[in-house]
Image (cartoon, rainbow, N blue to C red):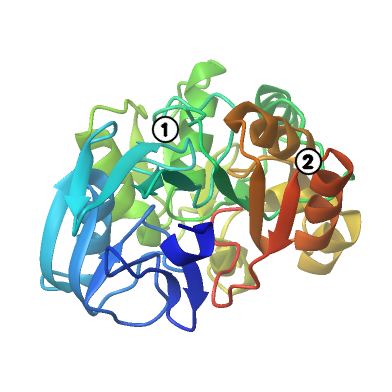
Amino acid sequence: MRARDLLHPRPEGLYCPPGDFFIDPVKPVARALITHGHSDHARAGHGAVLATRETIDIMGLRYGEGFAGSIQAATLGETFDLNGVTVGFHPAGHVLGSAQIAVEHGGIRIVASGDYKRRRDATCAPFEPVACDVFITEATFGLPVFHHPDDRQEIARLLKSVGQFPESAHLVGAYALGKAQRVMKLLREAGFDRPIHIHGALAKLTSYYQGRGIDLGDIEPATLEPGAKSDFAGAIVIGPPSAFADRWARRFPEPISCFASGWMRIRQRAKQRGVELPLIISDHSDWIELTETILETGASEVWVTHGREEALVRWCELAGIAAQPLHLVGYEDEGD
């Protein structure tokens, strides 16, 4: 059997003909295996969904009950037989519940990474390399210019600014699933023990993380009562990036705009967004981590998707590894 006979791209997403299922389809299908809960990978309307318990819960929070015809929960390390195809879920280290999906049949094993990171993150299970014949890797930050600094260093910069400008509220833009909770946990690990205020859009997911045993400390709503503007002097307020572009953000005292993202490595992006304190904190692997991961899997072939595909394909070729871009569409950078 050729690898392309086991998995290949279709307009709906990656399809496995012998197993008759899709991985992270972008359109409604009869059976979908979902790597994680970000909306560009996890969509409503499928006939059946197989994913980790956390991913299923997150989809329920985002889309409501009945987001799929039927659901089946997997635990990390568990395997399933789907029409003679062996499917396994392995930690991806991206967000809570994220998984790589291993597909094995006819003597070939393909691992679809979904999105993944290699940095320590106390809010989710760490990435585990899985030996395979073909590794499907993301390439969100698949250029040599991308090297993420230590996230503790970035949090220290934020706390230093809070100390330097006690009259200001620091507004931290962070994606609602994964990044926001990771920033909260990093603040706690750095010794910040005051309340962290959050935008209402983060409330459900943050409560879910806490319900899964992830201690984020005192989390309070970023609700401004009339005449209470000064109450937020020296506060850290976390919300979705879009919230800080509207009138909501201007209600806080002398706000300092921050954004936690791997894209903050690019100064022009920070400038375009009006970010005063860029924090380079990413839930994706950087260039070095991408290339090291490819080698760790031992894959003889690599398929590269949703990101800077050409550079990583070229690196593989120079390393003597067969590689090609998949050109999948419909995936964005929600968790960057």
- Quarter occupied by the N terminus: bottom left
Q: Which residue corresponds to the image point at 55% horizontal and 70% vertical from the top-left? A: 331
Relative horizontal placement of residue 81, taking residue 303 as reference (left or right): left
Relative horizontal placement of residue 203, taking residue 136 as reference (left or right): left
Q: Which residue is mark 1?
A: 195
Q: Which residue corresponds to the image point at 39% horizontal and 29% vertical from the top-left? A: 125
- Name the amino acid, label 2: Trp
Of the pair 7 and 282, the residue shown nearer to us: 7
Of the pair 150 and 167, the residue shown nearer to us: 150
Query: For numbered disc 1, what is the local secondary structure?
Result: loop
Of the pair 253 and 59, the residue shown nearer to us: 59
Query: For numbered disc 2, what is the local secondary structure?
Result: helix
CA–CA distance in space, label 1 to label 2: 35 Å
Callout 2: 10 Å neighbours few (<14), some, many (20+)? many
Of the pair 307 and 294, the residue shown nearer to us: 294
Callout 1: 10 Å neighbours few (<14), some, many (20+)? some
Relative horizontal placement of residue 282, taking residue 322 as reference (left or right): left
Query: Residue 236 has which mark?
Result: none
Q: Where residue 264 sits in the image (x, y, percent)?
A: 78, 50
Q: Which residue corresponds to the image point at 37% horizontal and 29% vertical from the top-left? A: 216
Q: Where residue 309 sits in the image (x, y, percent)?
A: 75, 61
Find residue 61 and report its image quarter.
bottom left
Q: Which residue is mark 2?
A: 287
Find residue 244 and report its image quarter.
bottom right
Q: Where residue 44 sits in the image (x, y, percent)?
A: 27, 75
Q: Where residue 108 sits in the image (x, y, percent)?
A: 45, 46
- Name the amino acid, label 1: Pro
